Amino acid sequence: MYQVIWNHELLLLFGSTGAAAAAVVAAFMGGMSLGAWGVRRLAADHARLALGLYAAAEIGVALYALSFHALLSGLQALYPGLWHMALGHPALLELLRLGLGLVILAPPTVLMGATLPLLVAALQADRRWAAKSVGWIYGLNAGGGALGAAATGLVLLPLLGLTDTRLVGVGLSAAAASLAWLARRPLAVVPPQSLPAEAPGEVTSRGNAHPTSRGVLLAVLAGAGFASMGYEVLWTRMLVLITGSSTYAFSLMLALYVVGIAVGSLWLAGKVARLRAPADAFAHLEIAAALLVLAGLWLFARFPDWQLEFYRTWGATFDSGLVIDAILAALIIVPPTLLLGAAFPVAVEALGAAGRRTGTTATATTLAVVAAGNAAGALAAGSGLVPWLGIEGGLAALAGLMAVCGWVVPFTRLGSAAGRRVAATAGILLVALGSLLVPRWNPLLLTSGVYERAPVYLDLLGGSVQLARLLETYRLLDYQEDNQAVVSVIRFPTLQTQPHLALSIDGKVDASTGKDMSTQILSGHIGMLLRPDARNVLVIGLASGVTVGSVEQWPSVRHLVVAEISPAVVRAERWFDPFNHDALHDPRLHLVVDDGRHYLNVTRRRFQVVISEPSNPWENGPARLFTREFFALVRAHLRPDGVYVQWVPLYGLSTSLLKAEVRTFLSVFPHVVMLQVSAGDLLLVGGRQPLVPRAHPPLPSAVSADLARVHSSRWDLLARFVGGTSGLREWVGPGRFNTDDNGLLEFGAPRYLLVPTLEANIHSLRRIPWRAGLARWG
């Protein structure tokens, strides 16, 4: 629960980039590693105090959670200065995020890392539970984590918001501490004993202590931890193509990952003590998990057709979509994680045998080493693995690493002759099947966006679900995977003379040379028509570059900053050069590859026009560009006469959510105008000063020509006027705002992704009092 909450809050500071998310996860796991390592001796030597220490750790976590927001506010005040000290160097910025993440997350995560060894120490002190304690505690702890992740992302945050959900977590920590404190009692402590000598003919791996073998096992555990966390990161990136990038989807995938770990550990908990060669068993579990990861790549290539068939059978609704997402994600995630969860108590048993250590010390050491590997795996998978190998190649490489880790163990003194034979056979099988199971994915099929376009595809295909046949009429021009997104450029068939190109990000079309042109061009011109002398302009979101190119047609612009979060989008923009006036080559342009909100958090610049044209508010990252706090941040970076242009969709939002977004905008900007720039798109324009088109000489010829591309002109603004400040206030009425805390659109909008809300919203817009506002506007 805390991981979900703190990750959400820290990304508001560090930005919604893949590298920032990886740094937060790495800091979290790094703290867990330090906590487990630091308590390994204490828990073993003072088992009678274990439950009391556990209670103290839980209380410490609860108290820190209560103060986390205040501490984060203090860090936010220091962050811009520290960011400028990094001089914009990517490696230094990565270290800065990781370092700050460790600073703010270390206290609670160190305590969290200590809790598992302390519970194991308490149970191992009781003879009735000693044999099963590691598997049971690890499994139950992971099961609680899965329940917490699912409840937080799917229920608590949508209903309660961040602040109240944090209080629920504090209450649960306090309850756990109270139960542990009440459960303290004198126990018949089992002293550390030497493991029994083996009878002739028994496997020699148990109890055969050897420093080199133990060192190899520790290295293998770190490698396995690296691979397992890499799986989680890359599975999430891969499955977003099927589920979409809503917070619900991310929460679901995290919960499934931890569920697999929990069930696997509980499944093997009672059997570990009976294993004659735990090192061999650990090795075989790791190799089998790697094989299942490769099998998942083969399955994934078939998911779009299966997903469409599910939608045809169960209907295209939010609830059915969530169930479909859970089924498909579980097919990929759960089988390997079952084995990874089972491997943990086996690894503890093998490590204890290798060094003749108590179960508590072995548990703490195993957890510390695996968590350290997790931290490194998160950084690698979130920062460099995808641009280097791609998602599919990255998962195959991680599976290979895990297989090698498993293969090595039986060839140490911890292994047996039988274990070596099985490992050798499994290695050959893995290579043979790996070459067959790792397919060449069809990029067009996997970026088809069934999660969003299922009703359209079902209408086009009728009773058939052969999506690949429909996509044969499309032409893939470009396909790239970076740390942030999967980006493709597709050419659609058209009867028009102008080619119809579309930019797709994680399967969702975010820009095109078709019906989106009106929105893209007018987004660039409306702010400039209101402030034709603007010299400094910020555009958040490059996409096709058409909006940027429209701004560049104004000769008054001297400095144009473009903030784009995805490097792959920047590279794909070249396909749209004929439609965006070759935007990226304008000498006035300064490109910043960063989250737009993060850029505003750290820059000292102020602008006369800011244009925000992000993706849809149902998506996890872009949702943060529609909140009251973000609008206030933009206002703080506007000059006194500056204007802010915000894109808002009429589709994918209920009327109540649309009103909430407009109400939020009105709460920040005293002067607001709403314009409808296409059938499904609105622009909200806000500023501190009245928004009236200024009388000025004839428009520059380049501006007039650009507007003519969408059959528009300066006077066309009158026809696109929907409402002014007073009329909009009357229309929205009193109600809730969309904030960082409540995530009203982030959690509400995904429920309307497959619902046709456009007509209802347009009908509601007609009830906005507009005459007085239009008179002032004209």
Image (cartoon, helix red, strand yellow):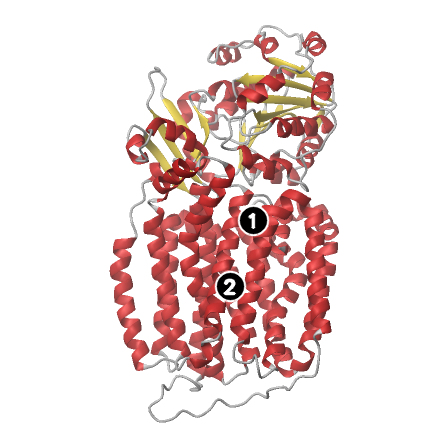
Instruction: Residue 712: tell me if it is visible.
Output: yes
How many labels, in total? 2
Left or right relative to 759: residue 479: left
Q: Position of residue 373 (x, y in %)?
A: 49, 64
Q: Which residue is mark 2?
A: 262
Q: Residue at x 30, y 77 (%)?
A: 420
Compared to residue 471, the image places residue 161 above or below, namely below
Q: Position of residue 167 (x, y in %)?
A: 72, 53
Q: In what element is the residue under mark 1?
A: helix
* Amino acid carrying mark 1 in the image: Ala
Where's the N terminus, which quadrant? Answer: bottom right
Identify the residue position indicated by label 1 in the image. Answer: 20
For the point 36% across and 61% down, the residue is: 290
Give the amino acid type for the residue marked by disc 2 in the picture: Ala
How busy is the neighbourhood of tag 2: few (under 14 within 10 Å), some, or many (20 plus)?
Answer: many
Q: Tell me where residue 101 appears, x and y as whole percent.
A: 62, 55
Residue at 33% x, 44% y is 302
In 3D space, how far apart are the residues under numbered discs 2 and 1 (Cα atoms)?
27 Å
Q: Nearer the viewer, residue 216 or 129?
A: 129
- Residue 53: image quadrant is bottom right
In the image, 554 versus 743, the foreground residue is: 743
Q: Quadrant for residue 146, please give it.
A: bottom right
Query: In terms of depth relative to the viewer, which is nearer, 655 or 620?
Result: 655
Apparent side of residue 152 relative to residue 260 in the rendered image (left or right): right
What residue do we see at 54% from left, 37% from top?
Answer: 750
In primary-sequence order, the first of circles 2 and 1 is: 1
Q: Is residue 778 above or below residue 232?
A: above
Question: Quarter-wise, where is residue 230 in the image?
Answer: bottom left
